[in-house]
Amino acid sequence: MTRLEKSLPQPEVFYRSLLESAGYRVWVVDREGRYLFVNEPVERKLGLKREEILRKTYGDLHSAKDNRDFLERVKRVFGDEVVTYEYFFPRNRRWSLRTMSPVREPSGEIIAVSILSKDITERKKAEEKLKEYADNLGQLVRERTKEIRFLSNIAASISQSIMVQDNNRKIVYVNKAFEDMYGYSKEEVIGKPASMLAPEGMADEIHCEITRGLEARGYWSGEILRRRKNGEVFPVQTSVSYLRNENGKIIGRFGVSTDITEKKKLENRLQRSEERLRSIFDNVPIGIIMTDEHGNYIEVNAAQRKLSRAPREELLRQNYHDQRDRTLQPFFKKALQGEAAEHEGWYTTTARGLTYWVRTIFTPIFDHEGKVDGIIILSEDRTERKRLEEQLLEQTRLGSIGATAAMVGHDLRNPLQAIVNNIYLAKKTYDAAPATFKRIATVEGLVERFNAIEDEAQYMNKIVSDLQDYARPLKPELSETNLLQLINEAFSTIPVPETVKVSMMIQHDFPKLMIDPTLMRRVFTNLITNAIQAMPDGGQLTMRLSKTEEAALISIQDTGIGIPGENLPRLFQPLFTTKAKGQGLGLAVCKRFVEAHGGEVKVESKIGEGSVFTVRIPLKREVSSDG
């Protein structure tokens, strides 16, 4: 006989002490809900003496609905079912876990229901944690002569594993649930060290951890590993408290355990599922923002961080209502009202002021009451696709313009040539006419009319040439060309007003280039003509010829009126012009001719200061340098 067994009181006192010192609320009721037994924690909870409680029913102390639910559960227990449920106390907003078990006679007849109640408010607040069961034995006393047997039946009926050990860590009591859980019979464990239930090498560590909790708080609760008889190691949720005798002296420990193997498996599955969802969330190529009902960011994925060019920590400090671009605010507000919304268009982010063409979907998140408590915002960056679509539309438009230009140029060329020929013949006729006719023609202004018709014909001829040059396929016929000489030839065909001063600046080692002189002469003729027309009141026209390691650079700078900033992106588009008299093909032709040489044309301009057009031609076709 162990020291604890020698010091144990009579069985009735032992079981009563077990129930009173466990620290949990234990009560027993009959089929009608009349209280047959309550322990001291129940008295404290209800604020009534035990004698008062034993004269009442459950319905006397609770609402009618609670009483109906309670009696329905009592009925289930009398049907040989163990009922476990959670109960909420509205008065003090506390939660408890109740386990209702049948109490049997030795014959097996169910004669009452034992209820063990444990406060689980903290677990409820934590949401993810396992319920901490610390159900203590309840002993029913209906007749003093039957109390020992009655209390023993209650202990045996508890669905959780119960183990009592003495101060020497020897097992002195286990219930049927213990035998089922561990695979040991009572005879195999009574008097044996409790360490036999610990995985190899972990007994002392577990004992010390529980001891620290008992010494600090008077109880310990948590998850530990245990070992079955067959050697299998499994997790349990355990609550341990001191066991005291009638004098309050600690005579051992009382533990209640629940096998949480399935719960841990479920937690692991949930964790893996969460990890998979997190991986999907972070790797989906669409930006995702999750906000609360106030617009505060609560999560963003990797695609959104890339789109915003900002780290997660910076984005989580933002509120969607504070977005600089207000375009999407009506859609966000619509989602807050419970309706999904969608928008596609240009949008500027707050984080870095970046502008994208984005398709954005706003989806409300509802809580269990159907209220919106957050928004999911999906953002798909379609900027590149939008640019490709615009390029395709532009190419289609330019193709249509080219086809129209070819047709119009071809149809106008013949009648235009007839007009030019007739003007030429008319002039010849005038030159051969008698003096009398010439005097009359002069008085009538016939010569001036011929000259006006000839100027307009030349202007029409330029339009036709531009149309045909823009429309016709280009195959530059490259030859070694002195660019300075080519530019001088262009100047020779252009009337330069006396109010315009021309200067030329040439890098000393500027090379000869392999270009198509006919095409490039047209380019410089158009650019020089435009520069002169941009200075109606005179000014300075400066040409610079220089080179880099990769390209030759030819710039034409004027001090004219300048070009408005909003017109610069459209300047080289066909049929775009700001001139009162012009078709908008000259610069489009220049761009096309230069690009046919693998080069490019750029423009810089300021209103009131003038413009600079720069032609860049790659030097890969360089032949030799001017000597």
Image: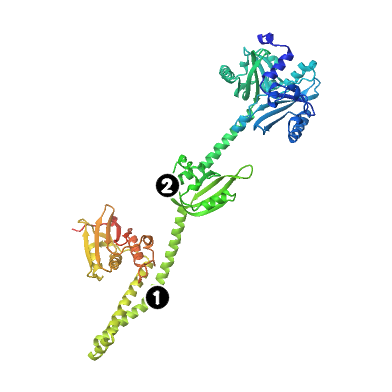
Q: Position of residue 479 (x, y in %)?
A: 27, 62
Q: Earlier in the sequence, mark 1 or mark 2?
A: 2
- Name which residue lies at 38% across and 66% down: 576
Q: Is residue 303 above or below residue 546?
A: above
Give me the C-alpha separation between circle 1 and circle 2: 54 Å
Which of these two is toward me, 147 or 47?
47
Q: Is residue 81 above or below residue 466?
A: above
- Name which residue lies at 45% across and 59% down: 390
Q: Quadrant of residue 505?
A: bottom left
Helix, strand or loop for disc 2: loop
In the image, taking residue 407 as reference, residue 142 lies left or right, namely: right
Write down the residue under mark 1. 411
In the image, taking residue 580 as reference, residue 186 lies left or right, namely: right
Q: Is residue 229 visible?
A: no
Q: Is residue 567 visible?
A: yes
Q: Position of residue 120 (x, y in %)?
A: 64, 29
Q: Amino acid at mark 1?
A: Asp
Query: Which callout, 1 or 2, points to the residue nearer the camera?
Result: 2
Q: Amino acid at mark 2?
A: Arg
Q: Which mark is residue 352?
A: 2
Which of these two is toward me, 608 or 476?
608
Q: Quadrant of the C terminus?
A: bottom left
